[in-house]
Image: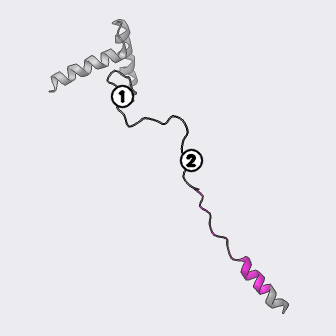
Amino acid sequence: MAKQESKDKSSSANIKPPRRDRMGGPPPPRKGKTKKNTTRNSSNELVAMNFYVPAEFKREYKIVAAENDQKLIDILKESFELWKERHS
C-alpha cells in the first residue's frame, strides 16, 4: 500500500498551478492633469520638427543666418514661402 500512496502523491505533484497573467490589469486612472493632445496648437506656437540634413548644409545654414543677423526659423519660413510660390 505504501507504493500506491507514493504514486498518488507524485501524480498530484505534477499538476501545475494555473498561469497568472503577467501583464496584470489596466493601470489606474491618472490623477491631476491629463495631456490635451486632441486640441490643435495655436498658429504661433512653436512645435518640434525633426529631420536630418548633411553636416555641411547645417554649418553653412547657420553661418549664413549669423552673417545676416537672422534666426534659423526665419530663414526656413522665408525659404518655404519662396518654394511654395515657385511650385504652385
Q: Is residue 20 magenta?
A: yes
Mark found first going from the N terminus, 2 or 1: 2
Q: Secondary structure at mark 1?
A: loop
Quadrant hosting residue 52: top left
Question: At x 56% / y 55%, what residue is drawn?
Answer: 25
Q: Secondary structure at mark 2?
A: loop
Residue at label 2?
A: 28
Residue 54 lies, in percent from the top left, at 37, 26
In the drawing, what numbered circle is on residue 41? 1
Which sits in the foreground, 75 or 8?
A: 8
Residue occupying the far right of the picture: 2
Question: At x 35% / y 10%, what residue is drawn?
Answer: 70
Q: Residues within 10 Å of mark 2 (few under 14, many from 20)?
A: few
**The N terminus lies in quadrant:** bottom right
Question: What's under tag 1, amino acid-wise?
Answer: Asn
Residue 78 lies, in percent from the top left, at 26, 17
- Highlighted range, magenta: 6-24
Question: At x 21% / y 23%, what residue is drawn?
Answer: 83
Compared across the picture, whether 15 is left or right of 56 comes to: right
Q: Is residue 48 magenta?
A: no
